[in-house]
Structure formats: structure tokens, C-alpha cells
Image (cartoon, grey):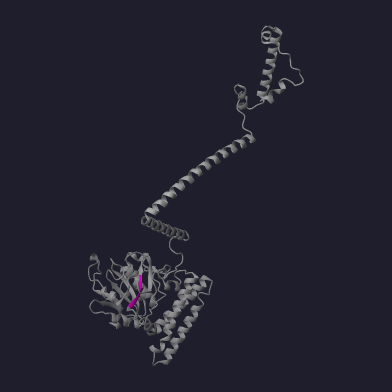
Amino acid sequence: MADLLDPILPEATPPPIEPGPEQQQNDPLHQAAQQKLDELRQQKVEEIKAKLPGTQKKLFGGPSVGPKPLPTTVEKATDARGQVRAAGQIAKRGGEIAGQVAKAVAAEVERFIAANPIVWLVIAIIVVIFLLIAIVLAIFAFSRLNGGGPAIHPTTASERQQVTKLSALTGNNIANTQLVQQIVDAEKNRLSAAKAIISKVYPSDAAKATAASNDLTAIISGMDAIPKTPDLATRQKLIKDSEAALQKFAVTYPEVLGYSAVHGGYLNVPGVKEAVAHDCGAASVLMVTLYYNPTLVDPSLLDSGAHRVATLGQASGTNVCVTPDYINANTGTKDWTRGIKGSTNLDQIKKSLAGGDPVIIYGSAGAIFSNSKHIFVIVGYDPTDDTFFVNNPSPSGVQVHTKSPNSHQMTSGNLVSHLGDTRSESDGGFGHNSVMMIRSKYL
């Protein structure tokens, strides 16, 4: 502050001779000069105060005059540096305290471990387990985020069954190229296996064996073009053409596919879904009808676009449909009938399959669904493990050509123990003694 007050008394002015104390009190001239000096000094101070911020004015003992000016950039920076320095000091002190605490805890842990090694081992194991669980949960969470929910395209055998092999082959479901390729490969393998046994089926008819072999070769060659065709409409036409040729072959040479169907193969019976629950009978009858007549058009019972029982048929159509008469009326076969409990057996089912004809089964609770009766279609038999291939309809989809519908292995023992249910419908049965629908020539 001395520098600020220096201009009040210029250095060029010589200092006056100071009188003694008594003279200063009694000398009027001295008193007047002193008063004038005080006034000049106060005036200078006021001028300086007027140029300073309010906080600095207070240094001269007077109150701030007017509103406090906004701080300058320099003042802001200075204030921020002060805060940073203060925060740094606090952080430094906090770090020192944390270090001391950590050292103390580490020392206590070391003493605890030394005194209780077994307890420490148990704790370490628990920590490792929790870490592993956390890792597994994290992986699961990220996997769900990376697609979350059901696969867009079938990737497992079970998912492919829900789409159904035949549904994709008939063009009723728009399958992706990979699925089409898998289905075509599977069908080609099945037909190649059938072609290999033609000579066993017609050992004494070389002309028929040659004709059957040539027809299968043409069908297999036609399938090769399906996955290579990018245009959807063209692909669907090729699929339908192949399916029609295959159906014609099945009718012309039923023994060939029949022989395969009882030696680890299956009949190419299409899949039909239920529109709603309890449509399993209608779906099964329609599957067999479509096997013989793939061009069937029946809007009251079959939704051809979705390849399922038509919702429109719920009122009256489905009950009429669940009868062998519907198959006889809509196919070239005219001898479909019901097999009665006590007069049918597994050998009759195998004969039907060997002849190229599927069988519709009335299954009691436990055959496929633990708490519900169910109607489904037998399409093949594998003697290596004594199991049957079935088409299993449901409202959510249809499993085709599977040995384990709804995870129930369809062994001979399982099938025999669940053939039919004569109890009334109100008691959970079928209300009749029929156990299957089958062509009468096999009974």
C-alpha cells in the first residue's frame, strides 16, 4: 500500500521542519497546515479507492460503494488454481490415510491367514466360485444381447423340425438358402439310399427296377438346381416340381420307398400344423391326404399358404375330417379304415410302411404328451433301435420324420402301451375303441 500512497507527497518537495510537540499544539499556522495535509491525504485515498474493486476498498477501512464488479479472467484463474491446490492437498492427505489403512488391513489379513489357513482357503474358493458365476452370467447376458430370443433361422435339428422339412420343400415356408441346402441334401441322401435297394425290391423285374432307378436319378438331379437358384419364385417352382415328381414316384413304386421306410428311412409325408389346440386329428388326416394328393385344395379345412388346418374349419369341418372316409374321398386310395383295439398290432403297421403307406395313430396320454391324448402319423421304422419315425402336429408347429416327438422316444414298447383310449371324451379318452387309421389290405 505504501506505493499507492507515494504520489500524495512528491519526492521533490522538501520536508518541513517539524516543531516540537508543545509548539504544534499552540501554533495556529501549524494546525492549519496539518489540517490541509490531512484533507489532501484523504482526497487522494478516496481517488484511489474509487479505482479499486470493492474487496480492496475495504482494506482502507471504508465500506464497498456500489455493486461488486464481476471477477476478471485473471481472478477466476487465480481462484481456480487455489481450489485445485486445495483439492490436491486434500487428495494427497486422503491418499496417505488410505495407504495407512490399506497397510493396516493387509497386516491384519496376513496375521489372519497365518492363524487360520483353512478358513482362508475356504474364503478363496468361495471368491473363485463367485467370479466364475459372474463370468458365466456376463457371457449369457452378452449372448442374449447379441440376438436375444429364438433364432431367426433354424440352426438345430429341433428348430428345423419346427419349420418341417417338407414345408420348406413344398414352398409353403420361405426357407433361407442354407436350410434349403440342408433339406435338399437330406432328401438326396434318402433317395440315394432308396435307389440302392431297388434291385432288392424288384429282384425278378429288371425293367421295372431300371425305370425306378432312372426316375429317382432324374428327381435327384432336379433337386440339385434348387439351392443354386437365387430367384424365389423360380426356386419355389423347382421345389414344387420336385415334390410332384417325388409323389408320383411314391405312387408308382410304393415298394421302393416302403422298403426304405422299414429299414431306417421314412415316407415323405408332409407336415401340417394345428390351427388351434385339439386339431391334431384333422392335421393328421390332412397330412396323409396330402401325401397321396399334394395338390389338394380344400379351403374349409386346409390353409394351403400356412400349411395348417384352416381356422375356418373349426365350426364343423374338423370333426367331419377326422375319419378315413376323407382320405378315401380325396385320394386314389379307397380302402382306408379304422383299426380296432385288440385286433391290430405292430406288424400290421410295419407292413403298411413297407407298402409305402403311412398309419394314423390314436395315442393315449403319455405317448407324446404326458397329460393329453394325441393323434399323430407313423411314417417310418428303424430296426437298429426299434423306434418309429412320426409326424407330430401341434398349434406351435409340426415335427416331421422324428423318432422323439416332444422328447418322447417312440419305441415299439411306447407305441404298444399307448395305442388307443376307449374312455369317454369327458374322461380324457377318445370315446371309441379305434387305435389307428390304416388301409384295410394290411389288417
Q: In which quarter of the image is the C terminus?
A: bottom left
Occupied quadrant, residue 325: bottom left
Image: magenta residue range: 387-392
Residue 49 at x, y = what percent? 65, 23
Q: Where is residue 413 in the image (x, y as percent from the top left)?
A: 28, 76
**Residue 253: quadrant of the picture:** bottom left
Q: Would you say 397 lies left or right of 81 here?
A: left
Question: Does 186 lie within the magenta span?
Answer: no
In the image shown, does 63 or 224 lie closer to the viewer? 63
Question: Compared to 278, does 7 lie above or below?
Answer: above
Q: Is the magenta stretch mostly helix, strand or loop?
A: strand
User: Which residue is at a point 47% across and 75% down the rendered structure image?
Assistant: 239
Foreground residue among 359 and 61: 61
> Residue 85, how many percent across, how many down?
57, 39
| Quadrant showing the N terminus | top right
| 388 or 298: nearer the viewer | 388
Work out whether residue 389 can be spotted.
yes
Q: Measuring 46% from the left and 66% from the top, which residue is drawn there?
A: 153
Give above or below for 128 relative to 16: below
Q: Residue furthest right?
A: 12
